[in-house]
Amino acid sequence: MAPSAIAASNGTKSPSLSFKSFKNSINGELVDTDIHRTGINPATRENLANVPVSTEQDLDRAVEAAKAAFPAWSNKPYEERKAALLRYADAIEAHAEQFADLLTSEQGKPVRISKKQY
């Protein structure tokens, strides 16, 4: 499950993320499911955002997509794969505050503890 990407409003190619809407990421696409669940913030007892409940078919699609992508990925030069992973890490770090807030709302842990996970 991933926060949903939203097209950037500033004209750049980088998408922004919504931490209020969640989808599965399969084969580079954000995919919804037929069934959702809602968590509860343990500190406030408020409902959190709906999240997709994946089926065995969703998992199978994700595994097939990964298998299909593996040959091209494994043939990329080391430096290109390294750069892609560093861009991914940079994207996570750019949203560290939002991820920490999400962990806090889902698990009830203090924000300072959530931030240590990033």
Image (cartoon, rainbow, N blue to C red):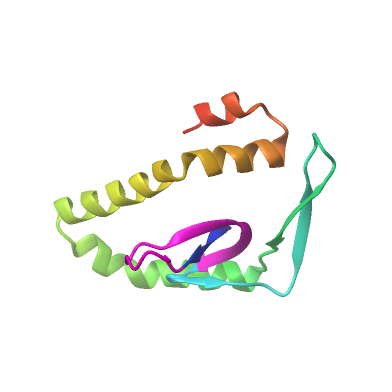
Q: Position of residue 89 (x, y in %)?
A: 35, 45
10 in magenta: yes
- Residue at position x 65%, y 68% from top? 56
Quick check: 103 above or below 48? above
Quick check: 99 above or below 25? above
Q: Is residue 108 left or right of residue 99?
A: right
Q: As rendered, which of 64 and 11 lies closer to the eye?
A: 11
- Residue at position x 40%, y 44% from top? 94
Q: Is residue 87 left or right of residue 15?
A: left
Q: As rendered, which of 56 and 6 lies closer to the eye?
A: 6
96 in magenta: no
Q: Is residue 72 left or right of residue 19?
A: left
Q: Which residues are magenta?
A: 7-25
Q: Position of residue 57 (x, y in %)?
A: 62, 73
Residue 12 position by quadrant: bottom left
Q: As rendered, which of 17 and 36 lies closer to the eye?
A: 17
